Image: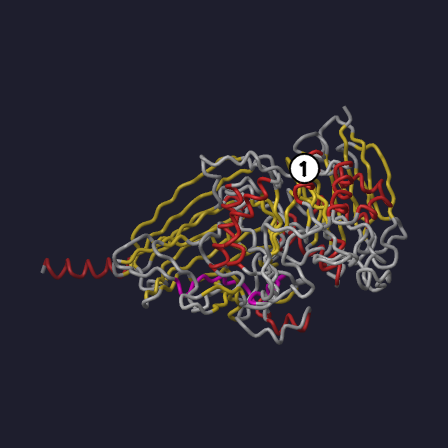
Amino acid sequence: MKFITLFFAIILLSCSNNNYKTEISSPDKKIKLKFELINGKPSYSIIKLNKSVISNSSLGLILKEDIDLSQKFYFLDSKKSNFNESWSPLMGEFKSIENNHNKLKVTLSQNKKILTIEFKVFNDGIGFRYLVPNQESIKNYDIINEITQFNISKNDSAWWVPAFSYRRYEFLYANTKIDEISKKKFSELVEDLSYDTLGINAAQTPLTIKKENGIYISIHEANLINFSSMTIAPKGEGVLEAELYPWSDGTKVKSEKNIKSPWRTIQIADNSSELLMSNLILNLNDDPQKNKDYSWVKPGKYMGIWWEMIGTNESTWWPSKHHGANTKKVIEYIDFASKHNFEGLLVEGWNEGWYPEWCCTGNGIPFSFTKSLDDFNFDRISKYSKDKEISIVGHHETGGQIENYENQLEEAFKLYQKMGVKYIKTGYVNDVSKNIKRSGENGGIIREWHHGQYMINHFHKVIEMAAKYKLSIIKHEPIKDTGLRRTYPNFISREGAKGQEFNGFSSNGVNHATDLPFTRLLSGPMDYTPGIFQLNNFRYTNPGSGKIDKNAIVPSTIAKELALYVVYYSPMQMAADLPSHYKKHLEAFEFIKNVPVNWENKIIINSKISEYLTIARKDIDSDNWYIGSITDEKSRSLKLRLDFLDDNSNYSAKIYKDSEKTHWKNNPMEYEIETVNLNNKSELEVYLAPGGGVAIELIKNN
């Protein structure tokens, strides 16, 4: 009888162990995360102040050799803890960042296999990741699928760009219901992708969502190392699921040993302004290793021989009588940049390998990263720039030829260190889906996705090699920012969206500028390259033609271009236009010269996603504040409360603004400059022209 009783007790205990639930809240108690094990299947849900954020959603991984870590689990252990500290980034939007969260670690077992899911709940959202320790019961840790769901509502709307598409992140944004995320819908609304049939229907992250209950969320990931980039695929009825970029053989992630996934992140906010204040991504990354010194990494502003090729079309990257990166011209740019106290000068097209048909399929002549073209005297320019206290921002366009770049990487970085170069702009233009070529074991060519684990590891290799030679990287055609700039401060900025360059040869449209802060910029700083002053009649039909392309237009105003230096954060900001264009508007150019790139604090004064945004930032090195405000195609009059200014203090405000006649299309270069005295009780009314903006410098009076 005792044996039978004990037998049934064991059976009941085992049955109860495949059902388990626990909850954990954010430090301010507003966000609540529930973890559940239901009949052996792990899942989670999130609410904020009794409003649903994520409904019950599945969790798990599928490994090779038929190892399914998404079901048939038993509860093994659960631990809760809390953490609260402040830390100071080497540079950033805040002098100090609070990292305050509650943590839950749940460990599950399945036939001697162990899976741990770790959650961190902050006041601004949650992060979770998978941990699979080394264990005898698992011989192969390769991942073939990730079962991570984000179950929301089919009536929720999203701002998104397509994944598994030819041009990485460089698209305008679509705004649709969740279930409509597809290449077909994107083709209807934004750009025809009907021919681009590789991959699945999915969106890149950050994926910004406005829920029908009014809550805003952004789904992304943090600390992406030695893994594959995550996209978000719609599964119908409001269910979203993580979809990892695969290797060419279909494997999602190759792992020789234990698994530690990136953090899957959900930033949560009550409104669009609150969404922009989150530091969740950075808080889910680590400080630099204690033995690593990054004090040599410095923020700054730079100019460049770049817009002549991609914008005005008066020069070429390749050898010709119109070659842009020649010694004489570079020295002229250095003189202008030095006179106006810039830190750097970008030089594109200095090296061998450029030719008219170089772009954009990853084929053709490989670039050299150490050999200069005949009309570019690197030694002379190195010495001259040093005397003028200008650092050359070197350019490495790889054309997506990764093995060619890696074979020259250390030699090229040694050369740059010798020449006094402190920054490198890297490029990976390869506008074909799944077209990053690598050599197979048998000598054949294998093609990988730009966002797969192969490229994740390549970018990591570049950052670590750059740190060895005290070089900072501004990466174009990158992998999205996942907060690694905290661990590797020399990963100073990146592109990763449709930037200003497209306004040079096509157009971003007037409203793209008000999409970016609520989408791409949620992940981290962007090298958007603002500051174009000649907004029409700037592009030649061909180098040397002398004929202006009347259809070319940058859909902005000068005041808006100034405002972008405050609205778009980057510790390396470019003044992208030509010196000759700045000389026409030297008064407006003063704002670019004065505006900082390293900040103590930021305030979101007002915002409405995709329509308008006003940000105030405090300089980290003074008591001065800067305000940038931008709008979509509609003109706006906004009242700005200045209660964030110091009490009992007066400020001299220099306001760079659109006039009543300014218009992004018909009259973009008209602006006014006004100086007024203000304090923290002032309410300032500003006018933003259609497609325009306003930039304000607030100097505290001593």
Identify the residue at horizontal 63%, vertical 39% (top origin): 299
In this rendering, is residue 193 above or below 295? below
**Residue that mark 1 sits on:** 383
In this rendering, is residue 613 above or below 364? above
Query: Does 401 sit left or right of 380 as displayed?
Result: left
Identify the residue at horizontal 64%, vertical 66% (top origin): 176
In this orientation, which residue lies closer to the viewer: 451 or 656? 451
Magenta stretch bounds: 143-164
User: In the image, what residue type sits under mark 1?
Assistant: Lys
Q: Is residue 541 visible?
A: yes
Query: Does 18 sit left or right of 507 as displayed?
Result: left
Q: Position of residue 43 (x, y in %)?
A: 41, 59
The image quarter containing residue 20 is bottom left
Q: In terms of secondary structure, where does tag 1 sit?
A: helix
Q: Position of residue 147 (x, y in %)?
A: 43, 63
Q: Point out the residue furthest to the right here.
A: 661
Identify the residue at horizontal 69%, vertical 30% (top origin): 622
In this orientation, which residue lies closer to the viewer: 450 or 662? 450
Q: Point out the residue furthest to the top here.
A: 702
Q: Residues within 10 Å of mark 1 (few under 14, many from 20)?
A: few
The image quarter containing residue 297 is top right
In magenta stretch: residue 145: yes
The quadrant of the image that shows the N terminus is bottom left
Q: Is residue 270 visible?
A: no
